[in-house]
Image (spheres, grey):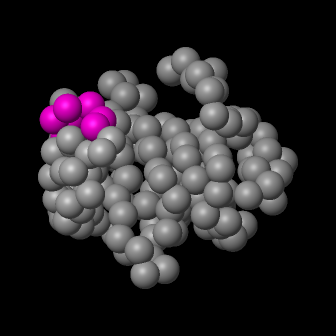
Amino acid sequence: MVRLGGGLTVYVPEVDNVLRRWGLNPVTVGDSREVLEDAFTTGVMSGMGVYEHSLIIRLSGYGSIVVVGCSHPGIDNIVRRSRELLGDVYLVIGGFHGPSRQQLDVVAKYSRYVCPAHCSGDEARRYVSVAYRDKYCDVKTGTVINLPMG
């Protein structure tokens, strides 16, 4: 049996007993709420038959940072929800799940910086880096971003 981070709290969109067996403390969260000071969940969103939520971190004086996993509900929908909850979006980072150009246009419209990673795909990275050169940041595993940027 694998034992990770004894008692570490993990916020999940649906019941997950596997995490408990791993020594974690899963907390099911349906609606948006503050999970740590200045850290919020978008609340459960669904898309492509998957339920997930994203993390929104308030960056005082700049807006918020939206950290996504694989964006099954649509990266544009996640950014819109984040904006509704906390206002200005400073940076969006994570997997955008092969988004359309239209979805990327929405993300760029509402965010100062756009950092597509892993499942975003090469086409999404290329599009943002050309169409929104001043907003694009190239990220991969191990990238360190010093905030605020620019």
Q: Residue furthest bottom?
A: 49
Highlighted magenta segment, given as a residue range: 3-9
Near-viewer residue (64 or 99): 99
Position of 61 relative to 67 (above/below): above
Classify residue 100 as left or right of residue 60: right
Residue for point 50% across, 20% down: 147
Classify residue 131 as left or right of residue 91: right
Quarter of the image for residue 13 reads bottom left
Magenta span includes 96:
no
Classify residue 52 as left or right of residue 96: left
Q: Residue furthest top?
A: 146
Which SS type dominates the magenta stretch?
loop
Quarter of the image for residue 52 reads bottom left
- The reply to whether residue 89 is in sight is no
Q: x, y percentage for residue 10?
A: 24, 45
- The reply to whether residue 14 is in sight is yes
Indicate the quadrant containing the C terminus: top left, top right, bottom left or bottom right: top right
Classify residue 43 as left or right of residue 94: left
Q: x, y percentage for residue 122?
A: 80, 55
Residue for point 50% across, 62% down: 71
Near-viewer residue (126 or 135): 126
Position of 128 relative to 145 (above/below): below
Q: x, y percentage for residue 60?
A: 33, 25
Q: Residue furthest front?
A: 1
Q: How many marks?
A: 0
Q: x, y percentage for residue 29?
A: 18, 58
Indicate the quadrant containing the N terminus: top left, top right, bottom left or bottom right: top left
Residue for point 61% across, 64% down: 97
